[in-house]
Amino acid sequence: MSSAASTVGCSPGWTESSPPLGHGEIPAGARHARHLYPVVLDVDRLGTSRDDFVRAMRKQNIRVSFHYPVLHLTTVYHQLLGLSAGAFPIAERLNERLVSLPLSNGLSTQDVRYVVQAIERLRRESLDNW
């Protein structure tokens, strides 16, 4: 499995009790701008789709979103290049799992904990309870 494909699941070393999401590594000497906090959901462990995850989080007043559409599936690229679903399966698989969490320098520690606890509750509970 390629390294890009393996990032769709859990990061190496994670256990069943680890959070069902992963994020990219920040290179040594670099700083995260903390403007967006994109993560890759492990939808199998969450037991839900990205879209259901977003809806459940919004019910908790947490504005989870996705910022980066798969370009080859947008109308313009489909029309210009004739690209369609299946052309880039790894990108499509990541797109089905990538969300941006509302975590930034402007949030209080309490707000960050609220987001993290909501994700933990979602992992433990059925979406029907939300």
Image: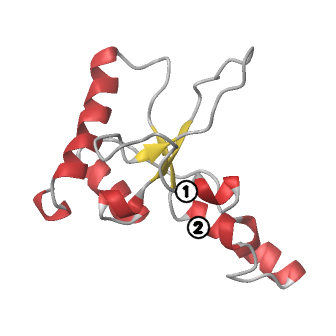
Instruction: Report the residue that reaches farthest toward the right.
Output: 80
Label 1 Cα crowd, 10 Å radius (few <14 / some 14-19 / many 20+): many
Badge 1 or badge 2: first in the primary sequence: 1
> Residue 91 lies in what quarter of the image?
bottom right
- Residue 33 image point, x, y percent: 64, 23
Q: Give amino acid for label 2.
A: Arg
Circle 1 SS class: loop
- Residue 125 image point, x, y percent: 15, 54
Which residue is painted at 73% across and 18% down in the image? Answer: 30
Residue 61 visible: no
- Residue 14 image point, x, y percent: 42, 41
- Counting the numbered discs, the total is 2
Q: How is the image coloured?
A: secondary structure
Q: Which mark is residue 17?
A: none
Q: Quadrant of the N terminus?
A: bottom right
Label 2 Cα crowd, 10 Å radius (few <14 / some 14-19 / many 20+): some
Residue 116 visible: yes
> Residue 63 lies in what quarter of the image?
top left
Q: Give amino acid for label 1.
A: Val
Q: Is residue 110 left or right of residue 27?
A: left
Which residue is painted at 67% across and 66% down in the image? Answer: 90
Q: Which residue is mark 1?
A: 8
Q: Are marks 1 and 2 in contact (CB under 8 Å)?
A: yes
Q: Which mark is residue 93?
A: 2
21 or 57: nearer the viewer: 21
Which residue is painted at 68% across and 82% down in the image? Answer: 85
> Residue 103 lies in what quarter of the image?
top left
19 or 37: nearer the viewer: 19
Which residue is painted at 19% across and 44% down in the image? Answer: 121
Q: Is residue 7 left or right of residue 3?
A: left
124 or 55: nearer the viewer: 124
